[in-house]
Amino acid sequence: MNRSVEFATGLFIFLGLLALFFLITQTTNIQAYGGDGYTVTARFTNVGSLKARAPVALAGVTIGRVENITVDPQRLDAVVTMTIDSRYDQLPLDSSAAILTSGLLGEKYVGIQPGADTESLAQGDEILFTQSAVVLENLISKYLFDSASGGEE
Amino acid sequence: MSLVRQFRDGAAEFFVAFGAAFLFLLRLLADTPRALARPGLIFRQVHVVGANSLVLIMMAGLFVGMVLGLQFYNTMAKFGAEQSLGPVVVLALVRELGPVVTALLFAGRAGTALASEIGLMKATEQLAGMEMMAVDPIRYVVVPRFLGAFIAMPLLTAIFNAIAILGAWFVAVQMMGLDGGQFWAPMPDNVDVYDDVLGGVLKSVFFGAAAGLLAVFEGYRAHPTAEGVSRATTRTVVITAMTVLVLDYMLTAMLI
C-alpha cells in the first residue's frame, strides 16, 4: 500500500470516530449515565407523565435522574427510584420530593425540598414526604364542582 | 393467462435471488475469519469504498443539514418554537436521515463500483484465473470488499450526521439569527445516547452489511458480458435502495 492510500484511510477512520464522539458528547444526555451516585426511592399516589431519566432537581439544579418507576402491587402506589449524584450526599433525611412541571406544558421532573434533619439520605433510603403530580383534569373538575355547589347555596 | 405466468415467474425469480443472496451471505461469513487474517486487504477496501466516498458524503451532509435548518427554522418560527430546532434536527438526522441517506449515496457511489469491479473481474476471467491458481476469489476478492463496506458505513454515517448538524447550525445560528445557546442547549435533554444515537449506529451497521452484500452479490453473479456487468450495476442501486428502505422500517419498528 502506498502512503497516500494509508493517509486517506487513516484520515477517514479518524474523522468517522471524531464525528461519533462529537455526536455522543455534544448532542446527547451521556452525562446522565455513569458517574457515581446513590439511589433513593419515593412513593407517589400519582406520577403524572414522569418518565425514566427525568431530572431530579434541588433548588432548580439537576442533581440526579429518575432511574425507574414501578407500581407497588400491595400498596397500589408508584415507587420512583432515583439516582442522586454522590457529590450531593448531604440531603437531610426529612427532605420532601414533589413532581413538578417545567413550564406550562413542559416535562415533568422531581423537585427535592430540603428538610432540617441532621442525618443525611443514603443509599436505599426512602423519601417519606412526597407530593404527587398535579393532574390538570382533577384540578379543573374540582374547581368546576366547587363553584357549582357554591352557586346552590 | 400470460399475466399470471409472468407474475409467477417474477415471484419465483424473487425467491431464487433472495435465497441465493442469503446463501452467499453465509458463504461470506464462513470465510470471514480467514479473511480477517489479512487485514491489509480489508483496509484497502475501506479506503476504496469509504475514503473515496468521503467528499460526496460530506457535501451531501452539509446541504441536507442546511435544508433541514432552513425548513424547520421557518416553520417553527411561526409557532415560536425555534428553541426546539436543535433537538429536532439532531433526532431527524441520527435516527432516520443520516443512516438512510448515507446508505443510498453509498449504494450509488461505492456499491456500483464494487459490483462493476467484481463483474468485470468475472467478465475478464480473472476470477476463474484465481481459481485455477487455487486462490479462492471469495476469500481474497469478495469478503474483503464486503467487510470494507461493513466497516465504512457506520463511520460515513457518523460523518454525515456531524456535518449535517453543523450545516443546520450554520443556517439557523449564523444566517437566521437563532441564538447559539438555544440551538445546542436543549439537545442533551431530548436526545438519548442509547435510543437515538446508538440506535442510528445500529441501523447503519445493518445498512452497511446489506449494501456491501448486495453489491458483491450482484457483481459476483453478473453475466460475464459487458451488458451483464452494466445490468448488475443498475440492479445493485435499485435493490440496495429498496432493501435499505424496507430494512429501515423494520429496524425502526424494532427500536421504538
Image (cartoon, rainbow, N blue to C red):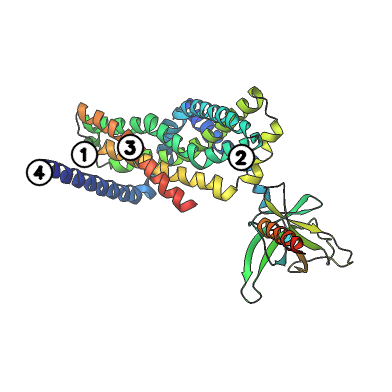
User: Tag 4: residue type?
Assistant: Met
* Tag 1 residue: B132
Q: Label 2, on which residue?
A: B87
Disc with the residue nearer the chain's start (2 vs 4):
4
> Mark 3, chain letter?
B
- The residue to which callout 4 is attached is B1
Question: Are discs 3 and 2 less than 8 Å apart at CB?
Answer: no
Q: Quick one: B226 or A128, which is closer to the camera?
A: A128
* Distance in Å between CA atoms under marks 3 and 2: 35 Å
Q: Answer left or right for B42 relative to B63.
A: left
Which residue is under mark 3?
Answer: B215
Q: Quadrant of residue B148?
A: top left
Sequence-first tag of 4 and 3: 4
Q: Earlier in the sequence, mark 3 or mark 2?
A: 2
User: Dot 1, crowdedness within 10 Å: few (<14), some or many (≥20)?
Assistant: few
Tag 4, which chain? B
Q: Nearer the viewer, residue A43 or A53?
A: A43
**Image mark 2: chain:** B
**For numbered disc 1, what is the local secondary structure?**
helix
- Which of pointers 3 and 2 indicates the residue nearer the eye? 2
